[in-house]
Amino acid sequence: MKDKVIVVTGAGNGIGRAIAMLLGAQGAKVVVNDLGSSGSGDGSDSGPASRVVNEIRAAGGTAVPDTHSVATADSAEAIVRTAIDSFGRIDGVINNAGILRDRIFHKMSKDEWQGVLDVHLNGAYYVSRAAAPFFKEQQSGAFVHMTSTAGLIGNFGQANYAAAKLGIVALSKSIALDMARFNVRSNCIAPFAWSRLIGTLPSETEAEKKRLARMQSMTPEQVAPVAVFLSSDAARDVNGQVLAVRGNELIVMSQPRPLAWFPRGGVTLESLAEHAVPAMQRAFTSLERSPEVFSWDPI
């Protein structure tokens, strides 16, 4: 990673901070981007980005702060411009910025829906799109995007977050397909780690309390090495993948592929009810949430 220029969004706290710190320790030049908003996206504060930059510099690394929002095209371009103006190039983008505005679906407001999509999905697109011409020109670059099992599997009260996070997987795959010819890679990480956003989740029932206790045992520092590795030349053969990081576990997540085939003649209402569904039902996916699928304690 020595002298590679990497933009990390949402790097003022949690996973983003851990990634930025490790990049700095590995000799990368880091743009520490953080708007400094609350967990729900309100307000702004230059403090978080500046503190992480100071920590990286104190440890002998190189970093600059950036406090632009990822949620508009102009401000995302300004983030990438910070890298170009400060270091003359850009080698990687780690799309980590995020907010939560959880609400059960039938009560979710338009603002709660749009705000989360603007930061997670639109933000990942805007920052990636701003960096893409530089990657194409130099014939190299790496994108790392944070997805979530809330989107890959499911969770209560997070329709906005889940939709955005699953959209990021499709965005990443499309980038990987479109830009592989330019030696540009794009991958996703589904991280399990304690953060201030996770700390906002409800903990009223015994099951919820147990889940949060399990999350507290998993640290951002366990996610950071995977993000840094995917940003490096050592990951040249990893492209278009979704990796889950859960404590000391590294998991390759499945991506949609045909599971069952119904080879009968013309499809009718009767054939669907009498033949297709019974024949294919064994391949249906259960209606489960992330904590039900990942039910064991992390290693």
Image (spheres, helix red, strand yellow):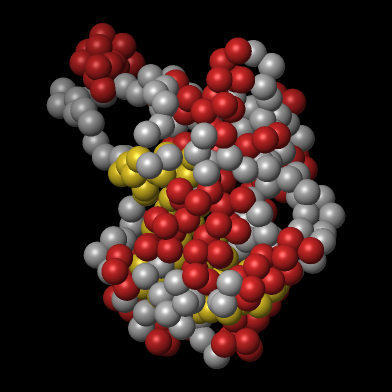
- In the drawing, does residue 94 fall left or right of residue 17? left
Q: Nearer the viewer, residue 129 or 34?
A: 34
Q: Nearer the viewer, residue 187 or 173?
A: 187
Return the x and y of residue 256 as percentages of the image width and height.
Answer: 32, 40
Q: Nearer the viewer, residue 91 or 161?
A: 91
| Residue 72 in view in this figure | no
Query: Where is the N terminus found, in terms of image quarters?
Result: bottom left
What is the residue that sits farthest to the right in this orientation? 43
What is the residue that sits farthest to the front in this orientation? 59
| Residue 287 in view in this figure | yes
* Above/below status of 11 relative to 41: below
Query: Where is the C terminus found, in terms of image quarters?
Result: top left
Return the x and y of residue 110 as percentages of the image width and height.
Answer: 75, 40
* Above/below status of 68 relative to 113: below
Return the x and y of residue 4 as percentages of the image width and height.
Answer: 45, 79
* Above/below status of 75 relative to 271: below
- In the drawing, does residue 18 fall left or right of residue 102? left
Can you tell which quarter of the image residue 135 is in?
Answer: bottom left
- In the drawing, does residue 224 fall left or right of residue 216? left
How many marks can you see? 0
Return the x and y of residue 34 as percentages of the image width and height.
Answer: 69, 63
The residue drawn where x is 78% and y is 49% is 38
The residue drawn where x is 62% and y is 43% is 195
The residue drawn where x is 62% and y is 33% is 158
The residue drawn where x is 42% and y is 26% is 297
Can you tell which quarter of the image residue 59 is in?
Answer: bottom right
